[in-house]
Image (tube, rainbow, N blue to C red):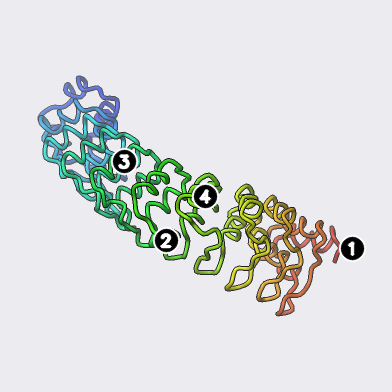
Amino acid sequence: MDQDTLKQLVKLTQEGNLRSLQELMTDALMLEVCGKHLGRSGDTLLHYAARHGHSDIVEFLVKRVGVDVEVYNNDYKRPLHEAASMSQLACVKFLLWEGATVDSLKKADWTPLMMACTRRNRQVIQELLNHSADPMLRNKDGWNCFHIACREGDPQVVQLLLLAAPDVWRTKSKTGRTPLHTAAMHGCLDVVEILLDRCDYTPDTADSCGVTPFMDAVRNGHVAVAKLLLEKHKASPSATDTLGAQPVHQVAVTGQDAALHFLVRDLNMDVNQRATIIQLTPLHYAAKEGHVSTLKTLVELGADLQARDKKGRSALHMACIGQHTHVARTLLQLGLKDSEDSSGTTGRQLAVKPDLIQLFESEFKDTL
C-alpha cells in the first residue's frame, strides 16, 4: 500500500466519508489495513473513527474489514478509550456491544471510565457503568475516576458516581490526596458542597506534603471554596504543612492577593507569621517567587520589611536568590537596606543577572 492511498484512507475515516472509504477498500486492502498502525502514535483506522465519532465507519471496520475491537496503539489505548475520552456515545455503545473490555488499561493505567470522566457526558459514563465498569480502579498515580470527576467539577457526574459506588470517595492518591483536595484545588464549589454533604471526610485531612483541602483552595485563589470549608467542615486556617508553612505563607508563594486579604483581614491571620522550619515570613516567600503585587499587598497589610529568617536573610536576599530584579527594586524603593545574612552574604553578592547587578551598582548607589 503506497503512502498516498494510506493518507486517503485516514482522511476519509476522519471525515466520516463511509461511501468513499468502501469504494476504495478492496479485499486486498482490507487485509493490509486490518491491523495497520499509523504514525508515531500507532493508531489504527478504528482509533481514528472512534475518536471522531463515526459509528458507521467503526461498524464497517469491525464487521467488514475485521479490525479487532481490542486493537491498541503505542500508548495501549483501545478504540473504546478514544470513544470514551471524546464523548462519542454511539461508538462507545457499539464497541461494548461487540465485546470491548470495559476496564481495559491504557498507558499509566487509565480506564475508559476515567477517560470519560475528563468530559461531562453523563450518558457515556452511565453506559460504561451499565456494562460494569469499575469506579474503584486506580491509575498509576492512585487516582480513580472520582478524583477525575471532582477535578472537572460537574456535580451531576459526581452524584452519578456516588450513586453507582457509594464508597468511591474513600480513596487517596499515592501522594495522599483525596477527591476533596482535588475539588478544592480546582475551585469546584458545587462539588465541594456535595462532598461535604455526602462524604465523611475528616477535617484538615493532609496529603503527604501536609497540605489540606483548605490550603489547596486558598493558595489557588478560591476564596469561596475556602469559606465553605471553614463554615461546613470546620477547617483550620492555621494548619501547617510538612515545612511548617501555613496558608498565609502558601498564598504568598502563589501570589493570590485576594486570598491574602481574606486570611489577614477576615480571619486575622498574622501577616508576619513564620514558617516553623526555616522561619520564613510571607514576605520572604513572595520575594523569592517574584510577586511584586503580593509583596506590596503584604506591606499594605503590615508585613515587617526588616524580618529575617533562620539564616539571617531578608526579603531582599530572597529576591536576589530568585534573580527577581523587579522585586529587588521594589524592596529598595520601600526602604529595605541591603545587609549581610548570618554567613556574611549580601543581596548584591547573590546577583547574577546583568540587570540585577546593574540595579545594585548604579541605580541605587545612594541606598547602598
Tell me the amino acid under the disc marked 4: Ala
Cα–Cα span, label 3 and label 1: 64 Å
| Residue at the spot of label 2 | 205
Tell me the amino acid under the disc marked 2: Thr
Considering only order in the chain, which callout, 1 or 4, is on the residue closer to the N terminus? Answer: 4
Q: Is residue 246 visible?
A: yes
Considering only order in the chain, which callout, 1 or 3, is on the residue closer to the N terminus? Answer: 3
Q: Nearer the viewer, mark 3 or mark 1?
A: 3
Q: Residue at x 69, y 50 (%)?
A: 293
Rendered position, 96 above or below 107: above
Kindly state the secondary structure of the residue where label 4 is placed.
helix
Tell me the amino acid under the disc marked 3: Gln
Cα–Cα span, label 4 and label 1: 45 Å
Q: Categorize mark 1 by other alpha carbons within 10 Å: few (<14), some (14-19), many (20+).
A: few
Q: In front: 287, or 320? A: 287
Rendered position, 164 above or below 290: above
Kindly state the secondary structure of the residue where label 1 is placed.
loop
Residue 80 x %, y %: 22, 40
Q: In front: 81, or 62? A: 81
Tell me the amino acid under the disc marked 1: Asp
Look at the numbered discs 4 and 2 and tell me whether their residues touch, using CB distance below 8 Å: no
Look at the numbered discs 4 and 1 and tell me whether their residues touch, using CB distance below 8 Å: no
Considering only order in the chain, which callout, 4 or 3, is on the residue closer to the N terminus? Answer: 3
Look at the numbered discs 2 and 3 and tell me whether their residues touch, using CB distance below 8 Å: no
Numbered mark located on residue 159 in the image: 3
Considering only order in the chain, which callout, 3 or 2, is on the residue closer to the N terminus? Answer: 3
| Residue at the spot of label 1 | 366
Q: Could you say which quadrant of the image residue 49 lies in? A: top left
Instruction: Judge from the rendering whether residue 336 lies leftward or rightward of residue 186; answer left or right.
Output: right
Q: Categorize mark 3 by other alpha carbons within 10 Å: few (<14), some (14-19), many (20+).
A: some
Q: Could you say which quadrant of the image residue 368 lies in? A: bottom right
Residue 169 x %, y %: 31, 52
